[in-house]
Structure formats: structure tokens, C-alpha cells
Amino acid sequence: MPTRSYGQFCGLARALDVVGDRWSLLIIRELLPGPMRYGELLASLDGIATNLLAERLRSLESSGVIQRGLAQPSGVVYALTPWGSELREAIGAFIHWSFPLMASGRGDDTVQPRWLAVALEALLRGRTATPPAELGIEAAGLFMTLRIDKDGPHVILQPDRRPGTILQAEPEAVLGLAAGAISIDHVLSQASVHGDPHIVTMVLAGAQT
């Protein structure tokens, strides 16, 4: 459990007692798409010291937010517990709230394509499709499938799953398109589409459709 507390009988304060430390929410963001090894977390969280990562993982595990499991063929992975997974909506709300902060562009900030999995589900929240539609997205070497169905958007990190239409683009372009910050025509002029460009518009173009 948390070693420090705000000492307030308030849901927000008690939540921050658990996940309010520096890096904690970013660790949870990393684990939302699926389990990761310690080394994978360390590589993705550029700037965190290995001892601090270990400390944060211990704290989140003792609080019941994450759990350890056995990886195949060997080793240990970290994963969110069902309770920890409930933070998806809160993190999605932060992503929506941050839109004005993202308008200045990437600058010198680091970016990991895995973060798109969380951002796309948040930015396209509320979008549904019947029948379901799927778009493969290849960004900075990572392949993911964005599926829109009657329940909303879902991002699947399974490289062997290949939808009929695949968009190859930079992470910033995919993010900007989903947020409605750049036009579909601008993205398609710089990206590569294998399959039906209409699927890109239907699935990914945010408020533009």
C-alpha cells in the first residue's frame, strides 16, 4: 500500500495516494495494451532510472494495481489487475484533456508507437460500426489493428493479424488524424495505404466523418 498519503477522506486523494507518484500513470499506460517484461518497460519509459521503476512496480503491485505473471518461454511479465484496468477510462480522459497541450507538436519529446494503442481508443471513444470495420496500422515498426464495432474502438497488438486494409504512417500523423487535428487528405498524401482508402477514412478520421 502507499507509504505516503494526503490524509484526506476523498476519492480523488485516495486514488492519488496509489497512482499519483511520478511515472506511476505512465507505467499503467504502458500496460493497458497488454503485459510487458521489466526490460521492455525500462526501454519504453525513456528517462526513468531502473531503481525507480522497480520501486514504482513494487508499490503498484502492493496496492493491487498490477500483478506479476510468468512469461513464455521464461521470465516474468507485469500486467494490470482487473482493478488496475479500470484506470483505462481515467487515462483516456487525461488524453482528451491534453489536446491543447499537444497542438505545439512533438518537438524533442520521445514517442513510442505502442502509446497509440491507448490514445486511439481514447480519441475515438463513442465511435461504433455495424458491421465491424478493421484497419491495420503500421507506425514506427509496430503493427496494430484498430477495430471499430458496436461496442466502440479496440486496438489489438497481434502482428500476425492482418486486415484487408493497412495504413503505414508516422505515429504523429495517426494521432493527429484520430484527433481531427489534420485532414485525411494530408495524411494520405504522405502515408502509404494498402487496400481501400475509404476504410482509413471510416475507421480513423475522427470528427471528420
Image (tube, helix red, strand yellow):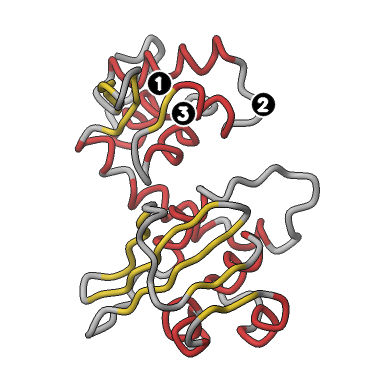
For discs 1 and 3, the disc positioned in front in the rendered view: 3
For discs 2 and 1, the disc positioned in front in the rendered view: 2
In the visual, does 66 lie left or right of 102?
left
Height in image: 107 above or below 6? below
Label annotation for residue 6:
1
97 or 6: nearer the viewer? 97
Label 1 packing within 10 angstroms: few (<14), some (14-19), many (20+): few
In the visual, does 143 lie left or right of 68?
right
Q: Earlier in the sequence, mark 1 or mark 3?
A: 1
Residue type at tag 1: Tyr
Residue type at tag 2: Gly
Where disc 1 sits, the SS reads: loop
Image quadrant for the N terminus? Answer: top left
Please give the residue where the numbered disc 3 appears in the rendered image.
24
Where disc 2 sits, the SS reads: loop
Q: Total number of numbered labels? A: 3
Q: Earlier in the sequence, mark 3 or mark 2?
A: 3
Q: Earlier in the sequence, mark 2 or mark 1?
A: 1
Label 2 packing within 10 angstroms: few (<14), some (14-19), many (20+): few
Height in image: 117 above or below 190? above
Q: Residue at x 41, y 70 (%)?
A: 124
Label annotation for residue 47:
2
Give the spatial CA distance, label 1 vs label 3.
16 Å
For discs 3 and 2, the disc positioned in front in the rendered view: 2
Outermost right residue: 108
Q: Residue at x 59, y 68 (%)?
A: 168
Where disc 3 sits, the SS reads: helix
In the visual, does 52 lie left or right of 151?
right
Q: Residue at x 28, y 70 (%)?
A: 152
